[in-house]
């Protein structure tokens, strides 16, 4: 696919400084993600005793929305024939937990928010990410990802908007605030770069010709 065409052939639009890619989700994909959210919560919390603190959202729902964002990102990777590994979310040992994707030895995390649209998701001018360098969050198993992809999911409209990415340095240097009782980095929306750029950084051959 030529670099002048929308990435993955999906609809693309600008929202302030963001280059947003709109990826449709099927009802089957949504239902599968909802079931995966239940499975992940049961495995982690009931069987393994691992608990997660989400921003005011039940674990089953939070995990499901996360899986939907991953599905959307994976659709772009597949459409553009990018070599990647989607790491197993259902592991039973801490040492086996990885970020969502691995591309050319770089660890890629996908962070998803559930909102009606991108405008609502960005109304405070930032996206959130757990402040793992803070004492309250330092026991999280995963370190910061090399790159973080941000998505916004609207289940009713069956859409996922991929808003861009930031690198590890940007995350760590972002200010920390207490959000729903836990520390989180507030990463300014203006710091997010188009997804096409992360693929260039990772040596995606079609864009680097």
Image: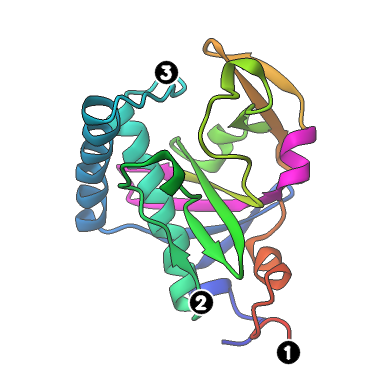
Q: Which mark is residue 83?
A: 2
Q: Residues within 10 Å of mark 2 (few under 14, many from 20)?
A: few
**In 3D space, how far apart are the residues under numbered discs 2 and 1 (Cα atoms)?**
16 Å
Q: Is residue 207 magenta?
A: no
Q: Which mark is residue 68?
A: none
Report the residue that reaches farthest toward the top.
181
**In 3D space, how far apart are the residues under numbered discs 2 and 3 (Cα atoms)?**
35 Å
Which of the two residues, 25 or 46, is positioned nearer the viewer here?
46
Tag 1 or tag 3, which sits nearer the N-term?
3
> What colour scheme was applied to this rendering of the protein?
rainbow
Location of residue 170 with respect to 198 vertically, above or below:
above
Provide residue 156's location: percent of width, then percent of height.
30, 42
Q: Is residue 172 magenta?
A: yes
Residue at the disc numbered 3:
56
Provide residue 128's location: percent of width, then percent of height.
60, 31
Which of the two residues, 104 or 205, is positioned nearer the viewer here?
104
Magenta region = 153-173
Q: Residue at x 57, y 63 (%)?
A: 12
**In 3D space, how far apart are the residues under numbered discs 3 and 1 (Cα atoms)?**
45 Å
Q: Residues within 10 Å of mark 3 (few under 14, many from 20)?
A: few
Residue at the disc numbered 1:
209
Q: Secondary structure at mark 1?
A: loop
Q: Secondary structure at mark 2?
A: loop
Provide residue 59's location: percent of width, then percent of height.
32, 27
Tag 3 or tag 2, which sits nearer the N-term?
3
């Amino acid at each position: 696919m030529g670099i002048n065409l929308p990435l993955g052939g999906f609809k693309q639009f600008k929202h302030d400084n963001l280059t947003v890619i709109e990826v449709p989700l099927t009802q089957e994909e949504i239902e599968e993600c909802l079931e995966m959210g239940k499975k992940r919560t049961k495995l982690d919390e009931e069987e393994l005793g691992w608990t997660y603190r989400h921003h005011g959202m039940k674990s089953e729902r939070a995990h499901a929305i996360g899986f939907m964002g991953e599905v959307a990102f994976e659709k772009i990777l597949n459409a553009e024939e990018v070599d990647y590994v989607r790491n197993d979310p259902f592991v039973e040992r801490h040492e086996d937990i990885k970020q969502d994707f691995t591309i050319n030895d770089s660890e890629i995390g996908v962070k998803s928010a559930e909102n009606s649209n991108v405008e609502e998701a960005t109304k405070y001018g930032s996206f959130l990410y757990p402040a793992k360098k803070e004492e309250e969050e330092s026991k999280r198993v995963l370190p910061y990802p090399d790159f973080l992809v941000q998505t916004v999911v609207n289940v009713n409209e069956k859409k996922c908007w991929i808003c861009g990415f930031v690198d590890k340095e940007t995350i760590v240097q972002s200010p920390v605030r207490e959000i729903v009782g836990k520390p989180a980095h507030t990463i300014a929306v203006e710091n997010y770069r188009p997804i096409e750029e992360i693929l260039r950084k990772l040596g995606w051959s079609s864009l680097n010709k």
